[in-house]
């Protein structure tokens, strides 16, 4: 039996055309990657934080494939992240049991990431086949229980994992040329950037494929997908394994750029953090995971710089932001961006260009210009970099005030409707009309 050609099947349906258009890359998608490249050159003092953000974005994207697209809520995604981390660490070190070496001393980073992703995928395949037969709270608790089991195993088998102290190891040069830089994080940053880009492309292809659309169908109506003959369980197991592979790759890169691994990679705190990142950015949106991770880490860093690290103030700040996001931005922070896009689509290029010029000028010539405005004590009373960000924010607000006003009005109307204010007002109006009649 021969497969009919596309011409023989007739014209492409509207749904197929929509999927093809969604799968086609857009110019706007280059913006986050351009910003990531610019950050390396403009903010060299923050490369460690930026490298961590890149790795956590890949981790958040892997979780979003489960939570946002397949509707599988997991509190144990760190089990897969930690599996990839320990595989890379054990592979590069030389642990021994009873004097017998169980490591390979293989420090080649790329193959370690690939093997970490493969082992994590196998673990996800086996565990997913079991736990995905459950639903709701049972599924949530099983994912958490599996993570606790691996955490305790890492503590008990200290001959291999190093126990609580973990494993310190060193990596070979990437492709035999580029050595990891533990001080300036130059190679580390581009290494994490390359792995993230590859993993993001894989996730994007999956999301916009027919397989990805079937996951959305399973999330929305599992019974209907069963009725039309979709192998629901195996589709869920498959995406669980793919998500595990991406999480394992992120875990391997995470420990490689630091040179050590501990049981913290299995911690519940990390599992909760990455879930918050996905919710902040918006579930079911790949770039929502990007936005959520960046906002989370920047809030954590800025709060600690301003209020100090003696008390966990950053957790309170992130909690407030999370509550506000859930109440007023149900589609996440990236959903706000999508709502405002029609109002300032033509102005975004002007805003971005002016902002980029101001930031670059501030970074390159800010010190010299600050000397012109130095006070009696020699300290500058004027900061060009600070003025650049203020002007950028002002240009953004002035160019998109209609969108901001419309978004605020819609948010207030939504809250009023849910609180019953609008319904009461409608009832009062009907009562007045009845009296007049």
Image (tube, rainbow, N blue to C red):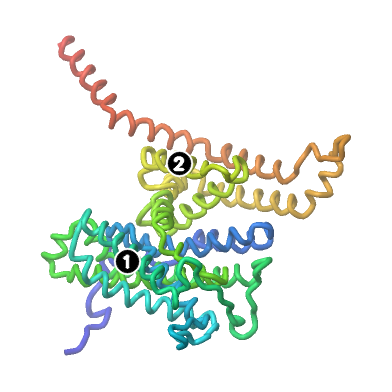
In the image as oriented, which residue stretches furthest toward the left? 227
Using the numbered discs, state the Cα–Cα distance from disc 1 to disc 2 in whole angstroms.
32 Å
Q: Position of residue 112 (x, y in %)?
A: 48, 80
Query: Where is residue 51 drawn, in percent x and y?
Result: 57, 63
Q: Which of the two residues, 131 or 60, is positioned nearer the viewer here? A: 131
Horizontal side of residue 437 vs 342, given as left or right: left
Instruction: Give the percent coordinates (x, y) of residue 403.
Output: 47, 39
Q: Is residue 20 visible?
A: no
Q: Quadrant of residue 15?
A: bottom left
| 190 or 315: nearer the viewer | 315
Q: Which residue does the image show at 36% across and 66% down from the upper left?
A: 152
Does residue 82 appear in this view?
yes
Callout 1 touching callout 2 (CB < 8 Å): no
Quadrant of the image containing the C terminus: top left
Please state if 180 lies on the left or on the right of 328 as rendered. right
| Residue farthest along the top direction in this orientation | 436
Foreground tag (1 vs 2) = 1
The label on residue 317 is none
**Which residue is at a point 46% across and 47% down the rendered structure image?**
337
Task: Residue at 63% x, 72% y: name it.
Answer: 187
Q: Is residue 172 above or below residue 266?
A: below
Q: Is residue 383 left or right of residue 313?
A: right
Q: Residues within 10 Å of mark 2 (few under 14, many from 20)?
A: some
Q: Residue 321: give its label.
A: 2
Circle 1 sits on which residue?
149
User: Along the line of sight, which residue is nearer the eye, 381 or 9?
Assistant: 381
Could you say which is closer to the camera, residue 374 or residue 259?
259
Classed neighbour count for the residue bearing mark 1: other residues with Cα under 10 Å, few (<14), some (14–19), many (≥20) = few
Tell me residue 64's x, y (percent).
37, 60
Residue that extends furthest to the right in the rendered view of this protein = 376
Figure check: 321 above or below 216: above
Quadrant of the snapshot with the N terminus: bottom left
């Amino acid at each position: 039996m021969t497969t009919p050609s596309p011409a023989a099947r007739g014209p492409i349906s509207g749904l197929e055309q929509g999927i093809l258009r969604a799968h086609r890359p857009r110019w706007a998608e280059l913006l986050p990657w351009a910003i990531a490249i610019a950050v390396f050159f403009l903010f060299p003092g923050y490369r460690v934080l930026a490298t961590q953000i890149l790795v956590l974005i890949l981790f958040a994207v892997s979780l979003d494939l489960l939570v946002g697209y397949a509707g599988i809520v997991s509190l144990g995604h760190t089990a897969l992240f930690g599996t990839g981390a320990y595989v890379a660490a054990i592979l590069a070190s030389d642990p021994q049991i009873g004097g017998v070496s169980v490591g390979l001393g293989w420090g080649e980073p790329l193959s370690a990431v690939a093997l970490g992703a493969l082992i994590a995928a196998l673990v996800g395949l086996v565990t997913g086949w079991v736990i995905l037969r459950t639903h709701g709270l049972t599924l949530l608790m099983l994912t958490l229980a599996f993570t606790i089991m691996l955490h305790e195993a890492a503590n008990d088998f200290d001959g291999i994992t190093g126990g609580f102290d973990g494993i310190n190891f060193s990596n070979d040069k990437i492709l035999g040329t580029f050595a990891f830089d533990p001080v300036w994080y130059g190679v580390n940053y581009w290494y994490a950037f390359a792995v993230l880009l590859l993993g993001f492309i894989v996730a994007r292809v999956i999301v916009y494929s027919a397989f990805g659309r079937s996951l959305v169908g399973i999330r929305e109506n599992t019974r209907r997908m069963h009725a039309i003959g979709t192998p629901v369980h195996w589709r869920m197991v498959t995406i669980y394994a793919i998500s595990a592979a991406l999480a394992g790759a992120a875990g391997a890169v995470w420990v490689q750029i630091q040179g050590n691994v501990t049981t913290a990679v299995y911690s519940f705190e990390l599992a909760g953090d990455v879930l918050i990142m996905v919710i902040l950015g918006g579930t079911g949106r790949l770039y929502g995971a990007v936005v959520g991770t960046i906002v989370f880490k920047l809030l954590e860093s800025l709060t600690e710089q301003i209020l100090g690290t003696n008390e966990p103030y950053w957790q309170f700040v992130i909690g407030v932001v999370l509550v506000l996001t859930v109440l007023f931005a149900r589609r996440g922070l990236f959903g706000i961006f999508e709502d405002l896009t029609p109002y300032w689509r033509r102005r975004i290029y002007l805003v971005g260009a002016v902002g980029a010029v101001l930031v670059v000028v501030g970074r390159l010539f800010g010190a010299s210009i600050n000397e012109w405005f130095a006070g009696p004590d020699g300290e500058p009373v004027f900061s060009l970099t600070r003025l650049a960000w203020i002007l950028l924010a002002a240009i953004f607000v002035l160019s998109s005030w209609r969108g901001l006003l419309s978004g605020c009005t819609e948010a207030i109307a939504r809250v009023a409707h849910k609180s019953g204010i609008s319904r009461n007002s409608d009832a009062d109006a009907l009562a007045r009309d009845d009296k007049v009649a």
